[in-house]
Image (cartoon, rainbow, N blue to C red):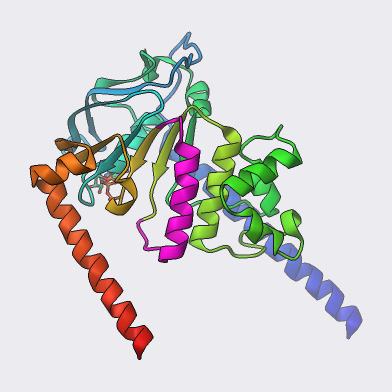
Amino acid sequence: LVQLYIPLNFMGMLYREIKQALIDIDDMFDIIEKNPEIEDKPGAKPLQVTQGVVRFADVHFAYIPERPILKGVSFEVPAGHTVAIVGPSGAGKSTISRLLFRFYEPTSGRILIDGQDIADVQQSSLRKIIGMVPQDTVLFNDTIGYNVQYGRWDADAEEVREAARLAQIDRFIGLLPESYDTPVGERGLKLSGGEKQRVAIARTILKGPPVLVLDEATSALDTFTEKEIQDALDRVSRGRTTLVIAHRLSTIIGADEIIVLDQGRIVERGTHTSLLDQGGVYAAMWNRQRQVDEARETLKRAEEEE
Ligand code: ATP
């Protein structure tokens, strides 16, 4: 029986390997197919970053011509500052980050980094200087150490550990059976949303990009994780030009400027307190979220008392 079991087990392993390889290839084609049309212009030069100022100048955009998504969006993120974009679902918030990465091109208007139109520079140089902490991080089927190291291949073990420490994931890694060598992803240990996001933050800290895009998780994390993640995000964005695509208002109180987007237009802008004073769209969103948070708290307390 053992003689039969070993080859069968081996075939099972082979089958899983092949299936995973096919899934990986599928993902790759998906990424390539999404943006086949964007190419470097002939003679495009690398982007030269001096300060890291990001500017959107009257940007219009539509995925399909008959349905405009951005209708003249202008704003600037000064070097080292944090600007947050909020607004109802479908307002066009994530579209702004996709345009900044040049996954798509504006129909009209310009996007500039330190005065250089991103349409004129080499895409590879653009993507190198922008760090992204996405809503949902995809982990490679490899060790957790590899997944952090992905931020910068020439980083040494000490730098990897320091990045993990700043992202508040080192203690968690320390408790894993094989520490940094523990396999994660589909074929290894499954990480929670909050843990995956901290791996993404550690990667970004290691990469150390001058411009940062944070696409916040929509899903509610538990309060403890949320605070830990917020601390880690604050740390990574300190001193970097940061654009936050915000789905939760509680996390952006400290932003230098908050931009309220509605149906592709900027309808309000200012700091948290000035927007509350205005008593407009933002103030209404804030009050609604506070009511939801309070209701959640009351429910939780009632459950704990039971
Ligand atoms: P959310 O808070 O729900 O993430 P959002 O403000 O980030 O919303 P976007 O993702 O920017 O919204 O999408 C803006 C609009 O563009 C939506 O109506 C969406 O359906 C549409 N859209 C997004 N991606 C595409 C696409 N690839 N093709 C066509 N329409 C799209």
Look at the image and say whether residue 283 sits in the magenta stretch: no
In this orientation, which residue lies closer to the viewer: 224 or 46? 224
Q: Position of residue 209 (x, y in %)?
A: 52, 30
Residue in the picture at 50% in, 53% down: 197
Whether residue 119 is visible here, answered yes or no, is: yes
Kindly report the secondary structure that dominates the magenta region of the rendered protein. helix
Q: Is residue 48 above or below residue 74?
A: above
* Left or right of residue 30, residue 296 in this image: left
Vertical order, 46 against 209 (above or below): above
Q: Which residues are magenta?
A: 218-241
Q: Residue furthest left?
A: 279
Q: Residue furthest bottom?
A: 306
Q: Camera-side residue: 299 or 10?
A: 299
> Does the magenta segment cover residue 226?
yes
Q: Does residue 40 sit above or below 282 in this rendering?
A: above
Q: Quadrant of residue 217?
A: bottom left
Residue 101: where, in percent of width, then height? 41, 31
Rendering coords of residue 221 (x, y %) = 41, 63
Residue at 67% across, 63% down? 188
